[in-house]
Image (spheres, grey):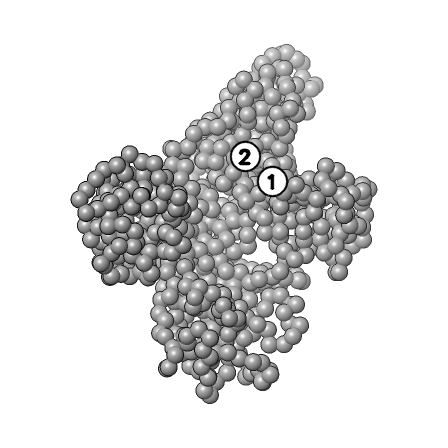
Amino acid sequence: MKGAVFLRNACAFYIRAEVHASSQDPHHTQTKRNSTPVGADVTSEKLKFRLAGYPRKHNEGRVEIFYKGEWGTICDDDFTLENAHVLCRQMGFVSATVWTHSAKYGPGTGKIWLDNVLCSGTEKSIEFCRSRGWGNSDCTHDEDAGVICKDERVPGFMDSNIIEMQVDENRLQEIRLRPLVDGIAKRMPITEGIVEVKYKEGWTQICNVGWTSKNSRVICGMMGFPNEKKTKKNLYKMLTNHQVNYRIHSVACMGNEVHLSICSMEISKANVSIPCQGGKPVVVSCIPGLLFSQISGKKPKIKQATVRLKGGWKVGEGRVEVLKNNAWGTVCDDRWNLQSASVVCRELGFGTAKEALTGARMGQGMGPIHITEVLCSGQEKSLWKCPFKNITSETCHHSEDASIKCNVPYMGFEKTVRLVGGRMDYEGRLEVKVGSRWGTICSEGWTTREAMVACRQLELGYSLRAVTETWYWDSSNVTDMVMSGVKCTGNEMRISDCQHHKSISCKKAGTHFAAGVICSETASDLILHAPLVEQTVYIEDRPLHMLYCAAEEDCLSKSAAKANWPYGHRRLLRFSSQIHNIGHADFRPKAGRHSWVWHECHRHYHSMDIFTHYDLLSINGTKVADGHKASFCLEDTDCHEGISKRYECANFGEQGITVGCWDQYRHDIDCQWIDITDVKPGNYILQVVINPNFEVAESDFTNNAMKCNCKYDGHRVWLHKCHLGDSFSEEAEKKFEKYPGQLNNQIS
């Protein structure tokens, strides 16, 4: 076709790692005949690095460098392992294991920035190694160099660690569905319309000659929909009055592509429109997932899923967890890619994956790692239909948990909520749009869970704080109150999905008491190490004369007040608890240290009144005994390798739990118990809930509770099947709740 070019695989897959290469390094003073340190040319240039090509893992690929506003490659002439070491360190890996030649990960495009590179291996940046100079090369892209880095991160190195797409914006800058009928655009999501591609000269169309359902499947996936459907012929009757400009013809997708630009197609040159002989513009019809097809009205009952997402603040993103043997576990990121991620996205009712994340970028899971080396083609209906390997040894750790970000339908929810009066973009008094009116929300009952929904709708991440008094924010342009009695579960996509009063009812209706939020891109996530509770449980009969401080802090049951002090004893169910922070922000008490309460008896400060609830429940759920734990010493007991402790309680120190660390309450400290003096022998459920009042925001509250089956025979106690509240399947959880009791003391 005259004036057209053939496009195949216009989309590269890469890992991003942006690094500013320092211009001061002792190695740039070395000399070698016919070569120069390239750093001489980039003293003020910010270099960026990425691993590209496909297929590949997150720690391997073609090396690409961003220099002078353009991405380019490195030629493999004279390439060495020392060069690879320097490059891998710049992308956040500890070292390289091998380098590759002859464009193993496919030929790149654009510039070949470096040739005949020679490093000693100790340089801080590739710019300080010898080479022919920037842009001086006699190679072709068939000689592009690649590296395979050791899959171990440099401690503290922050990068995106993402396998994602690089779209050639000169060819396919942006794609949309334009509704065929005016007014339909107001109804979200848009599931049907003309496929349009944006170029510098404006929006253009695709010729539908030869268009297939596989092509439509790719478009629907990009728009956030799991499936396509056949377009009704009468829709094309509406196209007669539309002016068209065809630049894309002969599209041929396989159906498993994550982006249209990967499909083969013919594209006309700029400003050249080629007639679509015998055809019309492409019209696509998509089927939304259940979450978006039931935005209003009662949600249908959905059968037990076998895959889920945890830890993400947006709908359609999170750590991938799968259900196996009635228990939820994570997926190892070995060979994790966009095809496998897309299968998960579609299975959950979203579109294709826009990012496949590795290295536990959505937080580390707890419990089992079920599968690894997942290799989907992209056509499978479920992740379980893909080839994979079971975890058979300690080859994978939770630092390698796989995560995803899916394409989701655009709903426009952010247009009906806004922040006003705040000092920064991520804080302020919350205003919502009800009908055509903007107004504030009554702050009575306004908690972290409501604030979490607001921040999600605002697309500002997590709630750092729910604000109930907003007098210190600017109130010069305050609107009327339009909503009260808001009560959310925390999982809703918008405030209007939460329960609220039909008519305004607010005792403190003044401007100073309107609901507000402070949002954050990151949040903590506390989780209890269940096996330790099971391993450390025992009973102690503790003399009353040793319990005065515990009584003062209300750590004993009510009957203790009637005891014959200091004679007698209390029977205590004791155990250790280890609380991990697996989120992306440190867990800090809501109150600053100026408001912490000093307890003279135990001689420590309480930074939170209630940090943990301990309950003993009957089989039918009735509470028979309880306890609680104030955060008298919220600190880093220990941390994972490469992470330093930040919080300790000694000398009125700052309290908190660092990401990657844990706080351990030993079984032998005061109040680390439940007073079971009045409990009769029998079968019970032990329940531990962290942060029970949602005082501090977390990315996931569903994993804050732990339950165990408990057998007490009047003298001894046994715990078994200790698990987090959401770590069992629905079937296993029902069996747990209907636990009939052990026939003997042998726990199977």
For label 1, the SS is strand
Question: Of circles 1 and 2, which is in front?
Answer: 1
Residues 229 and 63: in front is 63
- Left/right of residue 439 with respect to residue 422 in the rendered view: right
The residue where tag 1 is placed is 464
Question: Which image quadrant is residue 172 in?
Answer: bottom left
The amino acid beneath tag 1 is Leu
**Residue identified by numbered label 2:** 587
Q: Dot 1: within a 10 Å radius of its alpha carbon, few (fewer than 14), some, or many (20 or more) residues? A: many
Q: Quadrant of the N terminus?
A: bottom left
Disc sitting over residue 655 in the figure: none
Residue in the foreground of this view, choosing between 318 and 235: 235
- Residue 748 image point, x, y percent: 42, 40
- Residue at x 47% of width, y 73% of height: 216
Give the residue type at disc 2: Phe
> Which residue is located at x 46 percent, y 79 percent?
273
Question: Element type at marker 2?
Answer: loop
Residue 481: horizontal and vertical position, in percent? Answer: 78, 49
Vertical order, 689 against 55 (above or below): above
Which one is earlier in the sequence, the residue at label 1 or at label 2?
1
